[in-house]
Amino acid sequence: MEKDQTVIISDLRKFEPHSAISETLQKYTWRALEYETDEFSGCMLIAWQDSDVPELSYKPGLIGWYAIYLGLWQGTEEGYSQINIRLSGDKARIQVCPDEANLAPTEIEEVLWKYSDMTDQDVKISHPEGGSPTTSCIAYLKFVLLSKKEIEQIQKDRERKDTRRLVATHDIHGLFYYKNPHTIDDFLDEIEPYRYSDVEKLHLEYWGGGDGKDYPRQNGLFYGKDKIIFPRDGDRCLAESMMRIKSKGINYYKEMTQYAQSMGIKVYLSLRMNAFAADAPWDTIFVTEFYKDKPHLRCRYKDGSEIERMSYAFKEVQDCVIDMFKIMADYGCEGISMLYNRCFPYVMYEEVVVKAFMDKTGTDPRNIDENDKEWLLFKATFLTDFMRRVRVELDEYCKNTGRCKLAISVLTLANEKQNVFAALDVESWIKEGLVDDVIAYPMALIKSNKLSSSQTNIVPIDIDYYKRITDGSDCKLYIEILPRRMKPETYRQRAMEIYNKGINGICLWDTYSRHLLLRQWTMASRLGHKDELASWDDGCGIYFRNIPVKRLGSYRVDIFPPHWGL
């Protein structure tokens, strides 16, 4: 269907091979389902959760640059709807899903995918298999021809460096847990969505590589060596996928790092600073040999009871983590990221800490309020000593190995009070030049009559505090924006609030779950356009819109919902 300079491919039975498309529900073929809207009719393609279907391809025969839109349908069943898509000239795929929170079951979401030269290009779609069960539904493709002026503007915008002010994080766990990766292409797919975005730095969490350099957590039950029962299907996917990837010798961190760097994105490998063990019931699979073998290095509370954390008051714990940083550096990343926003605390009432405080003050810290300022600042000296070691030893390691100096990034808590309680003396780290980036995360340890110090909560970030301790330093400050899923207008407003306070950068935690939704990614990926945000709207009608469906198959669905009797 063509209208002016817009081409809509609504009958997706044109995809090939035709033998892989059927009018009925079959395991090994895509289902073709006719539909009708007020604007046009067509035939969508669907692969159900347990389908085993091949990649499909279509050559639209277009010449020149187009804006490419996808017509995505959620379906009326419960659960996720996701589909992989790429152009034949793309090295990697992206995975997308409709924004069900802003979409009725009887609506198609039309959303901008990308701008591209379509000359000699095929469109290829595939159904995610092997990971968490998902349905794939795509209703149509729309191509809008771009003018010469629009093409020039797009290319000029892609070359800009001043808009690169976003940090994106990826915990990698989600990749293994939900997608069960088998090949190096599965890993490169995780990087592709950042192409031409405003992402300056990509933080990839370290879980061990395919070259045998493993994080200590992978030396125990985590790999399933001693257990064949897993709490969740995703845990099984994670363990089996990691073993499979390792047996193939796939060095996925090196490949992902180089792929991101080819896009002009800096890569930091990140580490949760106390992820040595997890609470029950996950303690049977998320536990390290280091934690199991060294109970004397664990954190202790006032009464001597054990806290399921390793204490950074011990040099042996520090040595273990610094060794991990050196391994991470070998993958060619520009920096390392220390995730202090998870798995706290880091120093408590270990005997060595208690004795040192008593030697200095003559007071037993177990007999005073745990919020005593002198006690909290004293505990923080142990972690600051560790940060000094990290800076010195990494600088020396880089010098000895002939590589560029590694940047050090830290993710910290919501405000000064929470940081100090967790033994994070961030102000001293900045003054001493121990860190290059600080990312403020809206996490807090809560102390009240109802909540214990081990409980956590999301609270507003004290931006004024962070600006005060970073102003005049060489340390870059980024402010995290949560929750993970928001409307485009909410992203825009939150970003402007941050920039209006004089902050220059924004972080998006778990970005891999955000770019799945192209509706929000059309805004989130452009949040580095600091000076343009005020003149934008949310993009509705330009980057995305909802199209009501009148008919699915032979049934009207605009009068009574199709699932009204369920």
Image (tube, helix red, strand yellow):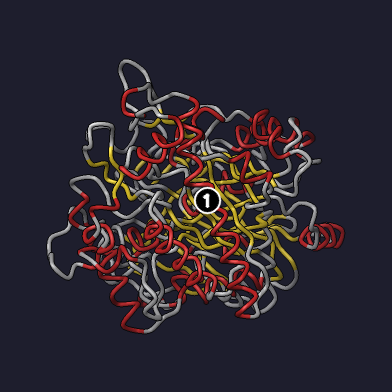
How many marks can you see? 1
Q: State the image coordinates of residue 361 (x, y, percent, origin top left).
A: 45, 30
Q: Is residue 182 left or right of residue 442?
A: left
Relative placement, left or right, of 194 versus 152 is left
**x, y percent for residue 544:** 60, 44
Camera-side residue: 60 or 287? 287
Whether residue 15 sits left or right of residue 110 in the image: it is left
Nearer to me, 228 or 62: 228
Q: Is residue 530 above or below residue 436?
A: above
Instruction: Decide if residue 550 is in sight here.
Output: yes
Which residue type does callout 1 highlight? Asp
Residue drawn at the location 42% of the way across and 44% of the way down: 342
Which quadrant holds residue 542? top right
Looking at the rendering, in which quadrant would you find the C terminus? top left
- The residue sitting at the bottom extreme is 248
As drawn, the residue found furthest toward the top would be: 449
Q: Is residue 59 in view from this perspective?
A: no
Query: Residue at 38% across / 41% down in the picture?
Result: 353
* Image quadrant where residue 53 sits: bottom left
Q: Identify the residue at image location x=32%, y=59%.
A: 177
Question: The N terminus appears in which quarter of the rendering?
Answer: bottom right
Estimate the x, y position of residue 191 in percent, counting from the top left: 55, 65
Label 1: element kind: helix
Q: Is 330 left or right of 361, judged from the image as shown?
A: right
Residue name at image x 69 percent, y 44 percent: 431
- Residues 520 and 293: in front is 293
| Quarter of image, res 467 | top right
From the viewer's perspective, is residue 418 above or below residue 449? below
The residue to which callout 1 is attached is 385
- Judging depth in this view, the residue of 401 and 503 nearest the camera is 401
